[in-house]
Image (cartoon, rainbow, N blue to C red):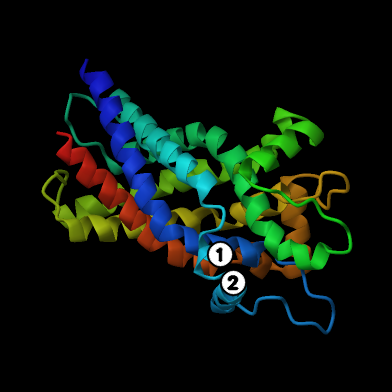
Amino acid sequence: MSQMADVAKDLTAGTIGGAAQLIVGHPFDTVKVKLQSQPAPLPGQLPKYSGAMDAVKQTIASEGPRGLYKGMGAPLATVAAFNALLFTVRGQMEALLRFEPGAPLTVNQQVVCGAGAGVAVSFLACPTELIKCRLQAQSALAESAASSGAVKYGGPMDVARHVLKSEGGLRGLYKGLVPTLAREVPGNAAMFGVYEALKQYFAGGKDTSGLGRGSLIVAGGLAGASFWLSVYPTDVVKSVIQVDDYKNPKFSGSIDAFRKILASEGIKGLYRGFGPAMARSVPANAACFLAYEVTRSSLG
């Protein structure tokens, strides 16, 4: 029974962690996607947004503060489910790798747990991110595509219906699965490895059960930063592939997208929106890990 009880605890704590992460992080994410997906300026023209703060100002000016929380409905359910799955699979992998019940794992074992959890969550992350990227990018793309009659989506279900109907069914929703896996597997391996390493460092040893909230916040924030540091270019590739036009695509696949971004914009192009991603990642993941740990320990 204890195994099922552990699953239930991880599911609950992961869900609450996910909600905390989203409330803190979503405005940053909106800005990140707007910067990543803004059309390249024509020669002699300035880009639509000069940077992150400019994107925030323009969004609030045209849509009010609510504009920063646009598209949050879909991720609220899915981020909760995503983190529930992430922490539950990690918990099950921890149980598999433990020598005896309750024994702390090494940093390397946490890296393996993170990688395994990354595989599992990719199958949930890929279609939900495709929907989210389309919704967030459409306001940035709308101005440039007014002439070309770009599809306007009414909401998350509308995107899903459109993709299922006219972009090849389920395969359409899983466009970008390869870069999603290339982001989630090494990213979560790095994140859980760094989280464990920092916790052990702060605790001065293997037993991290006595750490205070401050230490957990710092460890969680830096662990989140390490996720993006390790895999950011693959996230840019995933974003451009998922918002790519189905009928006349710019990119034939991940490698092609990587090459073309590199050719036209250099390394800089692969780090578009990196500032807001990092600025979001630290507080959002600190909130997520703290909420997870506090909930998990209160459940016994």
Which SS class for mark 1? helix
Q: Is residue 57 above or below residue 250?
A: below
**Relative to 58, is 295 on the left or the right?**
left
Q: Indicate the position of residue 165 as horizontal and vertical percent values.
A: 78, 32
Q: Residue at point 49% right, 40% down?
A: 78
- Read off the residue under disc 2: 59
Q: Which residue is mark 1?
A: 67
Confirm or deny contact between disc 1 and disc 2 (CB under 8 A). Answer: yes
Classify mark 1: residues with Cα within 10 Å, few (<14), some (14-19) or many (20+).
some
On the question of residue 192 being in view, the answer is no
Foreground of the two, 212 or 287: 287
Judged from this view, the residue extending furthest toward the left is 210
Q: For residue 23, what is the image quadrant?
A: bottom left
Residue 220 image point, x, y percent: 31, 55
Between residues 182 and 56, which one lies in front from this camera angle? Answer: 56
Badge number at residue 136: none
Q: Secondary structure at mark 2?
A: helix
Which residue is found at the position 73% from the left and 48% from the top? 255
Vertical placement of residue 182 versus 194, above or below: above
Q: Quadrant of the N terminus?
A: top left
> Which residue of the protein is positioned furthest toward the bottom in this rendering?
44
**Percent position (x, y) of residue 192?**
36, 45
| Residue type for callout 1 | Gly
Q: Amino acid at mark 2?
A: Thr
Which quadrant holds residue 113?
top left
